[in-house]
Image (cartoon, rainbow, N blue to C red):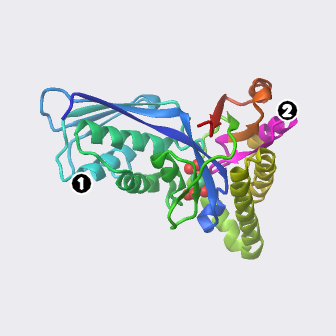
Amino acid sequence: MTMFAESSAPAKIILCGEHAVVYGQPAIAIPLPTIRAIARAFAPKSFGQKLRILAHDVGEEFSFTDLKDFDRNNPLLLAANLFFALNKMDIPDLTVDITSMIPVASGLGSGAAVTTAFVRVLAKVTERPIDDNDLNKIVYSVEKIHHGTPSGIDNTVIVYEHPVYFVRNQSIEKFAFGNPMTFVIADTGIGAETHLAVADVRTLYDANIQKISSIINEIGHIVKGVRQAISSGDNKKIGQLMTQNHKLLQELTVSSSELDNLVETALSCGAIGAKLSGGGRGGNMIALVDNLNTVHIKDKLLKAGARKVFEVSVGNH
Ligand code: PMV
């Protein structure tokens, strides 16, 4: 065991296709390399068979002392347990410090990023390397605590840290950008639980299968269009399709007045396209922008009530 190790994992956005992805349609997700969760592990000299986890951003501390008797609804304890089981090892004497730049419960993949960084640091400090496929399985199992029946898109884009065209239960398709893209991301500051929005869409679907299926299929077409536009580097088309996707998400009742307000503000300031990203009802709005007007758009979004704004460019290398 080494004395110290550090690992991290990125936030993510869903560019298009959320919710419809639960029903077998494709979705596109992109990692945000500059917004990260970081885990640092310190191995003291004593052997106390105790793992201490300090989750600074949520102000919580957990201890893991028993492989069988622990809270399985605690994402970090479950992640640690799955990692130790995979490696058939006892609980090491360790302290893990977790910090994150990613807003919690906001559609940016905070939970999956924290779990990913955490398991990676356990692997590093205990010198038991884990490959991305095994890591992805662990993070997916932990995601079930937050999301019930997640499609798997969040853990996949975050663990592999690569843009993905994702279809549930199919092998993932990585892709490259025809042109760089710059996003302004605005946080409503409203935490929203994805599993509730997913459950509400399911109720809507069950009540009106024909209508909701056609919205879901339309979202699928949009995602295919975005996939093509990414290859050809047609950012204008991507933006138009994002805004159309937002309208369909409104019809699925997963937007909110705050998200709609941020979408309208971004568009009225010249964003190429804008939509909610993730489960919706709160969380974040993403706007595809020209590099020229990002300062203006960010300023207007803050004035329109955004709690935080981020600017992220992808596809530059
Ligand atoms: O975890 P979030 O809030 O980024 O949303 C995940 C995307 C959904 O399609 C709404 C749910 C899922 O499991 O794919």
Q: Could you tell me which secondary element the residue under label 2 belongs to? A: loop
Q: Residue furthest right?
A: 268
Residue contact at pointers 1 and 2, CB within 8 angstroms: no
**On the picture, is 201 further left or further right than 248?**
left
Task: Please report the residue visible at 14 percent of the width from the left and 34 percent of the height from the top.
Answer: 48
Q: Position of residue 80 (x, y in %)?
A: 30, 46
* Residue carrying label 2: 269
- How packed mark 2 is, by other alpha carbons closer than 10 Å (few <14, some 14-19, many 20 or more), is some
Q: Is mark 1 within 8 Å of ligand 1?
A: no
Task: Please report the residue visible at 78 percent of the width from the left and 34 percent of the height from the top.
Answer: 290
- How packed mark 1 is, by other alpha carbons closer than 10 Å (few <14, some 14-19, many 20 or more), is few
Query: Toward which corner of the image does residue 274 lie, by quadrant?
Result: top right
Q: Position of residue 179 (x, y in %)?
A: 70, 42
Query: Toward which corner of the image does residue 45 lie, by quadrant?
Result: top left
Where's the C terminus, which quadrant?
Answer: top right
Q: Position of residue 309 (x, y in %)?
A: 67, 29
- Residues in magenta, as a range: 261-284
Q: Residue furthest bottom?
A: 210
Whole-number angstrom distance, CA of label 1 to CA of label 2: 52 Å
Q: Is residue 101 positioned above or below 114 on the image?
A: above
* Residue carrying label 1: 85
Task: Please report the residue visible at 63 percent of the width from the left and 58 percent of the height from the top.
Answer: 27
**On the picture, is 215 further left or further right than 131?**
right
Q: Position of residue 104 (x, y in %)?
A: 54, 38
311 or 196: nearer the eye?
311
Q: Is residue 80 positioned above or below 141 on the image?
A: above
Q: Is residue 249 positioned above or below 41 on the image?
A: below
Amino acid on which the number 2 mark rests in the picture: Cys
What number is the disc on residue 247? none
Q: Does the segment drawn in magenta span residue 126?
A: no
